[in-house]
Image (spheres, grey):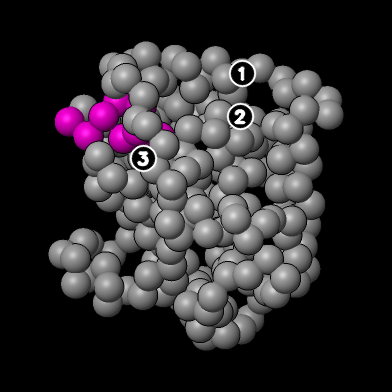
Amino acid sequence: MPRVREDYPYLWHLCFEEVRPETGTDYPCTARQLRDIRHPPMLRYPRPVSPHEACDALVDFLGRVPRPGSKTDAALCRIGDALDLLDWGPDLIIKAFHDLDRAFFATTLTGMTTVDWFANHEFQAMGCPPAYGMTTSLYPGPQAIYLNARNIFRTGQAGHFSQMWQTMLHEMMHAYYNIICGHYNRVDHGPVFREAMLAVDRRWRYCFRLRAIKYVDGLIEGIDGVD
């Protein structure tokens, strides 16, 4: 794991700088990938299925061991290297989006999802309660993932590196269900959401010996009614 950085205000300000392949955190990505995150080309939405079908499909995907040398295996290797970085910034989680999508969501989100850092007041302006992140469905337009810079990097908070990854995976799960199930079949934090997140956590632990979800008194933060 990387060192716990003390420069929280610096990290907060970095959230709002332009993300470029050649600057910032050293993570392999292309200008086209970053452009698609800002302005997704909007591929065709799949035929909607039930939340249970969407959950079963993802759990099945995550239960299979990626073939060595495959694109999924390569994505997991790049993510693993990133988890050991000593010098990193908030742009890392955006640069890693395509690899996270390939390794944990079977490339469902790519081309249909935007990701951006937001300030806390922007969450409040949208009438949202304080949170680490939020996903809005602009169906039939793109999904939009917003990460709360203040809450993830707030002064004095330990473990903000892990919180950044955990929040992204949580919000990507919302986007996954919105895309697969359609806008009118909301899943929220029900049993199928929980089951799929546990499957993500199992692969994350198997590959990286770390947790993709946070437990508080035996309950999952952000899912089991724990903020």
> What's the magenta bit mostly, secondary-structure-wise?
helix
- Amino acid type, mark 3: His
User: Please, is residue 51 above or below residue 171 in the view?
Assistant: above
Mark 1 or mark 2: whose residue is earlier in sequence: 1
Quadrant assignment for the N terminus: bottom right
At label 2, the amino acid type is Arg
Question: Which label belongs to residue 63?
Answer: 1
Q: Position of residue 151 (x, y in %)?
A: 41, 69
Asked if residue 146 lies in the magenta stretch, the reply is no
Residue 213 in picture, x, y percent from top left: 51, 43
Mark nearer the N terminus (2 vs 3): 3
Secondary structure of the residue carrying tag 1 is helix
- Residue 37: tell me if it is visible: yes
Residue type marked 1: Gly
Circle 3 is placed at which residue position? 174
User: Is residue 200 shown to the viewer in this render?
Assistant: no
Image: magenta residue range: 175-184
Q: How crowded is mark 3: few (under 14 residues within 10 Å), some or many (20 or more)?
A: many
Which residue in the protein does label 2 denote? 202
Q: Distance between the residues labelled 3 and 1?
A: 20 Å
**x and y, in percent, of residue 161 in the image:** 60, 62
Q: Distance between the residues labelled 1 and 2?
A: 9 Å
